[in-house]
Image: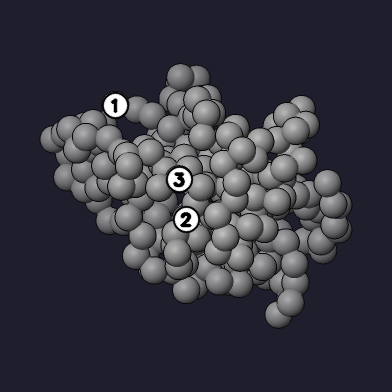
């Protein structure tokens, strides 16, 4: 993994609110998984990602790499429907994990699963989204993943025999979360810390997942993702 030092300017206004002391442990550990209510009306849509303040916190320049490169296109979102045609869509890409002014790269993966309207609440879309990464102990998968990402970035179809493609299609350990339409054509995923997804083109996605209990406003995962199956 590549280690890069970033000067960090913490903005307290961006910090994700912490759960109240009265919240149950079950609620705190199952963010976005409470049974939806069918009687409540949908409230206002979630706010869009605070792109400018994150760029400021990360000291992003015009050609800054890593998380700054992900944020560079986040204001160009197109309307994106998370309901996959097949009912189960899977993405893979390079993610940058920011923590206390430093970032390391990871292989980020995402799964979207179609669900019935009767299983979601007001304002929620008929899909569940799970965000994860490929563990480093998956040696063969980690070795082949960069080849897949490069091929997809070029618009090529990776070989189905590639270990990373096979792993992603067979993976079953996903943690699903509800998803809502947010402002500025973004989607908001109700995961701990919150995640925003931006559709660009050809099913390419940008994703920023904030770290829930961090004192640093910019901590989280920033990723560019490409579809393996849709």
Where is mark 3, residue-wise?
Answer: 229
Q: Is residue 116 visible?
A: yes
Dot placed on the residue nearer the N-terminal end, 1 or 3: 1
Helix, strand or loop at label 3? It is: strand
Task: Name the mark nearer the viewer: 2 or 3.
Answer: 3
- Residues at marks 2 and 3, CA–CA distance in whole angstroms: 18 Å
Residue 197 image label: 2
Residue 2, x across and y down, in percent: 84, 52
Helix, strand or loop at label 2? It is: strand
182 and 114: which is toward the camera: 114
Where is mark 1, residue-wise?
Answer: 35
The structure residue drawn at horizontal position 66% and vertical position 36%, both measured from the top left corner, is: 163
Residue 114 image label: none
The structure residue drawn at horizontal position 68% and vertical position 66%, both measured from the top left corner, is: 68
Residue contact between numbered discs 1 and 3, judged by CB atoms under 8 Å: no
The structure residue drawn at horizontal position 72% and vertical position 50%, both measured from the top left corner, is: 146
Helix, strand or loop at label 1? It is: loop
């Amino acid at each position: 993994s590549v280690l890069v030092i970033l000067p960090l300017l913490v903005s307290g206004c961006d910090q994700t609110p912490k759960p109240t002391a009265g919240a149950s442990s079950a609620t705190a550990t199952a963010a976005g998984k409470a049974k939806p209510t069918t009687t409540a009306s949908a409230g206002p849509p979630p706010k869009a990602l605070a792109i400018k303040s994150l760029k400021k916190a990360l000291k992003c320049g015009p050609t800054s790499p890593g998380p700054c490169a992900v944020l560079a296109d986040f204001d160009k979102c197109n309307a994106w429907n998370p309901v996959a045609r097949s009912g189960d869509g899977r993405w893979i890409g390079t993610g940058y994990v920011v923590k206390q002014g430093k970032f390391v790269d990871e292989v980020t993966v995402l799964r979207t699963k179609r669900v019935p309207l009767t299983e979601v609440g007001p304002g929620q879309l008929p899909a569940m989204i799970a965000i994860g990464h490929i563990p480093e102990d998956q040696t063969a998968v980690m070795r082949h993943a960069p080849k897949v990402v490069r091929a997809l970035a070029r618009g090529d179809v990776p070989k189905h025999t590639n270990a990373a493609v096979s792993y992603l299609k067979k993976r079953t350990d996903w943690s699903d979360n509800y998803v809502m339409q947010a402002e500025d054509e973004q989607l908001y995923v109700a995961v701990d810390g919150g995640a925003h997804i931006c559709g660009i083109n050809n099913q390419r996605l940008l994703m920023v997942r904030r770290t829930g209990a961090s004192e640093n406003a910019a901590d989280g995962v920033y990723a560019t993702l490409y579809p393996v199956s849709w």
